[in-house]
Image (spheres, grey):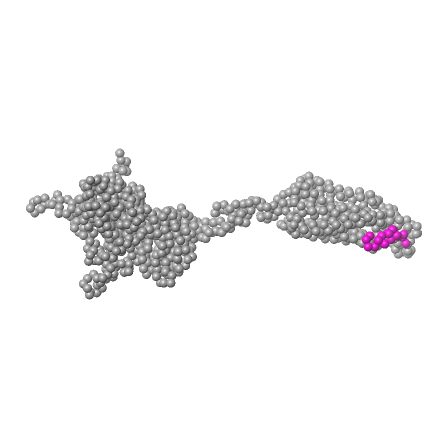
Amino acid sequence: MLGGRGLASTVLELVWISWLASVLSILGQIRTEVMASGVQLDGDLILGGLFPVHEKGDKTPCSSAVYDRGLQRLEAMLYAVDLINRDPELLPNISLGVHILDTCSRDTYALNQSLEFIRVSLDALDTSGLECSDGQAPRVKYRAKPVRGVVGGSYSSVSLQVANLFRLFHIPQVSPASTAKALSDKDRYEFFARTVPPDTFQAMAMMDVMQLFNWSYVSTIHSEGSYGEFGIEVIRNLAIARNMCIAVSEKIPHNADHEIFDTAVKNLLKKPTARAVVLFTRAEDARGVLAAARRLNLTSYFHWVASDGWGKQSHLVEGLQDVAEGAITVELTSQVVKGFDEYMSRLTPANNKRNPWFPEYWETFFGCKLGPPGSDLACPNDRRITTESGYQQDPKVQFVIDAVYAFAYALSDLQRTVCPEESLVCNAMNNYGGGAFYRDHLLKVSFKGVVGSQVKFDERGDGPARYTIYNFRKIPGTNSYNYSVVGRWYRKLHLNLSKVSWSGNSPTVPTSVCSSPCQVGEIKIMQQGDACCWICTPCKDWEMIVGEFACEDCGDGRWPYQNKSDCYDLPHKYMQWNSIFAIVPVAISCLGIVLTLTVIIIFGKHDDTPIVKASGRELSYMLLCGILICYLNTFLLLAMPGLIICALQRFGVGFGFSMIYGALLTKTNRISRIFDSASRSARRPGFISPKSQVIITCSLVSVQVVATVVWLIIEPPGGRFDHPTRDQVILKCRIKDSSFLLSLVYNMFLITTCTVYAVKTRKIPENFNESKFIGFTMYTTCIIWLAFVPIYFGTGNSYEVQITTLCVAISLSASVALVCLYSPKIYIIVFHPDKNVRKLTMNSATYKKAPTASSAVSLNHGSEGVKLQTVPGTPSRTATEGESQGAIENEALL
């Protein structure tokens, strides 16, 4: 049973057929007028033809202008019929006839013309109301034969209209030029076939061309009607699928004038970066667009990509060659049918009586008038239609001939199937249904066409898709232009870019993009409403690109690859021994170690000499050990951070300084106490023996050791990764810079205290040189440390500079103590051993009595000995008492 929709459709068709029957009954009575408007050749089997012989008129259906391509296609059908009728193997003993009508390039007019085919097929002449004068029943003098199929139409809009009509009466139709995608729908156009492919493939070829040129932002212009609208719909769908954008889309209506064309071209300028323009138009509309571009002085502005509506027609660009230069056009791959050119060259108005429109074409082609010789603009008798006279074969001629041959082969197959024992048209052929003929015979034909290419139909009745890509270019060195083949398309594009020439014969492919591709490391910020327009924004240095539209932080310790597609772990940096930042402090440290060991060796060899004893041997050795540890700290600070290294760094720096400044504090305190005590009484101060001094120094050092141990417990040592900048990973000890400086507070206290004692003992008589050297040492040390703190914090972003600064500061502090305290002693021991005697270090005191003098004590360590002297202004004492005081002080110092 039929569904509701199917039943309604059937009822409508029956009503439509009934109405047509009544209309055609009337048409039968005026048959003579209708028949005069076409080309008729009698034959055993008749094929219909629909071709645009005339261009469409403005106020009338047809204009007086003959359409060159349409007339060529008409003659191609006649030429094909002639070849078939002369072929003894194809349809032997059966002749083909034709009934060709003019569509005037207009769909509504073509539909009206096609009613003639329907009338003949229905044989709808009603004689019931007619009677002869003698009372006899009327006898039909001529009965037209029904068409077995129709070749045409050319325009898709025409085929869409007439295919619906032919479907109702099961009349097969084969078009040589209609490419609308909708015609592949067998539910709507059940008996339609074509020797050309649908526009889907043409649109794919055009899109492949633009994609090869890297055009992502284009405008489109299409003609009103099925050809342009269906074609541009495919272009839009493919553009979305391929991430291309349509900037401006303009439609050219029927009967467009100059103003409409100018407006359309002006609208293209609203998107100035979309320089590529897709034309899916009829030939006349394409020429109108080019003319508008000329009027608007946009001769070389646009880059045209045109469908087969433009193809390779020379008359379309005549007078507009400079505007069309560089255009890329698509045309169905076809070959010139040489026999047809010869056929056309033999035709004249005198011998071509079967084509009623040929005289008009002749006059238009040669620009003359047919008439008596000698009249104005009379056509000479020797004119012929040849390439020399400006003739160019229409590319669709091949497909018209193939369409006629398709019918011939299908009819031949039908004849062999239903009339196997006859070579003529049998009744079975006459009664064979058009639908069955279409499905069982027409769609199954496969043969070599007139130019040797394979002709066949797929299940939708479409022909094979083969396209040729043309480039309209200026011939170098001339003022002539031509269409040059630059590529082909069969399932995929094959195009030679080196052969493409653009406006001004430029070989450089022009651009047609809204926004240029973003550089490496940039993302797209899309503009609202336009998928092909964006602003490129760079990601930060430490970010990678996710997709095309987002940046993502790589995270600490990671850095993006150069292409920003992913991140990698940064290499861990630490001080390298071959770096200049390590070589310099190592050199200073090595020099200091050598000098320190030299001093220790010299002191060891001269351990019992007076100058060594006067220096305080125990404290001197402790002080030298502290200096040596400070120099060795350089190697710990430069070593690769780890648990042991970091622990030794914390311990070594504070321990070395505490030994130096603990010993110096003990020594300056001892000197200060001795002279303070001597100025007050002859009683010997306490805790000035060597053993006491060592114990005091060790006590001072132990404070630093305990503090360091507590620090190691609270903040365990080890390595950590520092990120002074996002592109650096520094392997450092797990300690903050502020904590490190805080750990040196105790040593700063020792330095400050030493400095205070150095200031207090600054007025000791000149003969006691060591107090002044200690003072100079402490002053210099304070300057070094005051300079070190801001430099250390200020170089936090450069671990190399910071570590080098710390190493040099420690070495300088040790060097100051080494040089200032021990260079005078080493100088005497090595170069003046004559002064290194007890006589000079332990002189008895000499008193000079004066009535009013204050007493002062002067000790001379080293070369000057010890003298007690009465200063004027102090009460005079006996020599025995003075000697005893001097002895006490010397014993304390020694």
Q: Is 435 situated left or right of 751 in this image?
A: left
- Residue 436 seen anywhere in this rendered image of the structure: yes
Q: Nearer the viewer, residue 482 or 631?
A: 482
| Residue range highlighted in magenta | 829-846
Residue at 23% from the left image edge and 41% from the top image edge? 416
- Is residue 196 found left or right of 547 in the rendered image? left
Q: Residue furthest front?
A: 88
As for residue 845 lying within the magenta part, the answer is yes
Q: Nearer the viewer, residue 297 or 262?
A: 297
Screen quadrant of the N terminus: top left
Is residue 604 covered in magenta?
A: no
* Whether residue 18 is visible: no
User: Which residue is situated farthest in the top direction here?
Assistant: 1
Disc count in the image?
0
Point 31% across, 54% down: residue? 283
Q: On the picture, is 196 further left or further right than 785?
A: left
Where does the image place residue 705, in percent across and percent down from the top left? Answer: 73, 42
Q: Position of residue 35 (x, y in %)?
A: 18, 50
Q: Nearer the viewer, residue 177 or 5?
A: 177
The image position of residue 570, as x and y in percent, is 58, 46
Rendered position, 325 above or below 458: below
Relative to residue 170, is residue 464 drawn left or right?
right
Percent x, y for residue 267? 37, 55
Residue 321 against residue 115 in the figure, above or below:
below
Q: Nearer the viewer, residue 272 or 350?
A: 350
Question: Residue drawn 39% across and 56% down?
Answer: 500
- Which residue in the rendered view is the most extreme toward the left? 134
Q: Place residue 644 in its image quadrant.
A: top right
